[in-house]
Amino acid sequence: MGATIEITNPNSQPNQDVFSATLLELAQADKDIVAVTSDSRGSGKLVTFGQTLPKQIVEIGIAEQNLVGVAAGLASAGKKAFAVSPACFLTARALEQIKNDACYSDNPVRLIGISAGVSYGALGTTHHSLHDYAVLRAINNITIVAPADNFETREAVKLAVKHNKPLYLRFGKKPMPLLTEDSSIGFEFGKGRVIKQGIDVAIIANGETVYPALLAAQKLESESGIRATVVSMHTIKPLDSELILALAEKTQAIITVEEHMVNGGLGEACASLLLQNGYNKPFKIMGIPDEYTVTGSQVEIFNHYGLNADGIAAAVNGMFCPL
Amino acid sequence: MTDQELIAKSVQYRKNILKYIVGAKAGHTGGSLSCIDILNVLYNEVLNVSPENFTSPDRDRYIQSKGHCVEALFVTLADAGFFPESDLETLCKYQSHYIGHPTKKVHGVEQNTGALGHGLPIAVGTALAAKMDDKNFKVYTLLGDGELPEGSNWEAALTAAHYKLDNLCAIIDNNKLQITGTNAEVCNTDPLDGKFESFGWAVREVDGHDVKALKEVFAAMPFEPGKPNLVIAHTIKGKGVSFMENSVKWHHGVPNAEQYEVALGELSPPSPLKGE
């Protein structure tokens, strides 16, 4: 089934832990930052936030429509509202509130989808968010971001406070290794981060699939001599079209990897951009196929669908022939 | 404003509602006529909202959850000076900002609404922000009785009571009809008073066409300290035009020329509201 994903940095934490710690730090200096939760302060790692800043947390209970509506009202009155809820419920159950109350009315709610993708693993399809990119991409006036590591997460939360527009941030439960210690690679919404440079193939991934993409690139280089560029395309919308089109020029093939159903996600966003700009080189989307996922942990599900170093490398080898 | 002045305004507002619906060949006639006295009293007697203070964080907020009755809101805002009334001649026309539901593109509109069951949660969040910041502004939202089956209303009703939002006032335009028929036929929501009281709200019932009673009920807020306020305003769909009253047909019916003339005649002084 392929190698499991090894955590190489012992100091790494789950991105949603980094989210909550960063939010607490920022909220201590800014009383307008408010966490709004749907009985999710435990899973959202906001227990300490609630104990430290009890006046800056609003508990809604298990009512996602109301969660987003209330957050929109708070935002309309000047609060920097972070609506925190499992990604699966937040983006499906409250979709109309996201569309109308946050985005259409331009109330700058920061939507925080926790335990995203298949983080809940064996809890099954009801708890997987493999549709969130697809549905939110179809909505105007929202920025969609899936940070890959703790650095990106910390920076994303800092930017979210200043963003003042509707925003969706997506986090998983698993500790994430640091992708790069190169401090020159900055982070801003809408700009992909090139984690590794290579001229043969571009692997465009986001969220928790960037690390296996990086491992795949290392494997390709050592075993096949294929030099891959690896991009953390943390922002799905707006997409960094400039970078993607530059990669299309520079490399011979593009592959996308995401913790989302293949329909409507990062891959289709890239495909649309590339096709409309005359791209005609090999292109492949890797993600969860259009089926209800197998039972297992996140890692087991990743392995099942080849979203690991071996699977991504094999996909590249299968589509890419060095000139 | 005297009660007679308010009554005269209601007559004029009703005429304007019909005028612009006829011009647009579209609109929600029955519900706009049922809720217009409530908007009249809110904007002319209750709300600390004006074109001049509309960006002030301390202003009162009005959120129209029953967004389909936007004509009632637009004629009221025009009269309050938010925009020239002549703008409404573009209602629902190509590229007009005056579309068939409230939009913030129109000066004076607080939130984009139209999909039902959205106003109360947003109002709860706004009222909660006022409490968190120790601000004194109040938040009002007008709900249609027909939108109450949306679950988000009841989620928000729980939250409003949980946070003791006595600075929040929800008003139900209780005209007892919705697009398909009577509420009782479609989804019986009675008894509304008992439902909201059991959720922890303070409830008052009022004749939603009696401007004096409406003034008094809003002046009595908070009805009970620590409880969100609910005004059940008993109204008549199509109020003021005899052939429209209590008729589902006029939910979004548009009068033809002859019906329009008859309606205007009925709305001319002496007002049908007088002496009620």
Image (cartoon, coloured by chain):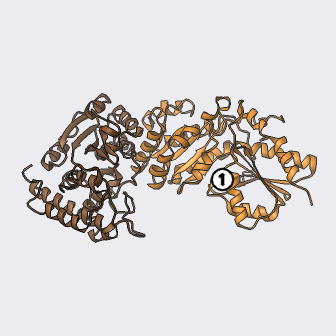
Which residue is at 15% across, 61% downward? B267
Chain of the residue under label 1: A
Between A19 and B123, the residue placed more toward the observer is: B123
| Figure quadrant of residue B89 | bottom left
Residue B169 at what x, y percent from top left? 28, 42
**Display colour for chain A:** orange
User: Which chain's colour is brown?
Assistant: B
Between A12 and B204, the residue placed more toward the observer is: B204
In this rendering, the answer to whether A105 lies above or below A246 is above
The N terminus of chain B lies in which quarter of the figure?
A: bottom left
Which residue is at 72% across, 61% downward? A243
Relative side of A11 to A161, left or right = right
Residue A279 at what x, y percent from top left? 77, 65
Relative side of B162 to A181, left or right = left
- Residue A8 seen in this snapshot: no
Residue A313 at what x, y percent from top left? 85, 46
* Secondary structure category for the residue under label 1: loop
Residue A95 at what x, y percent from top left? 51, 46
- How many numbered dots are placed on residues in this image? 1
| Figure quadrant of residue B97 | bottom left
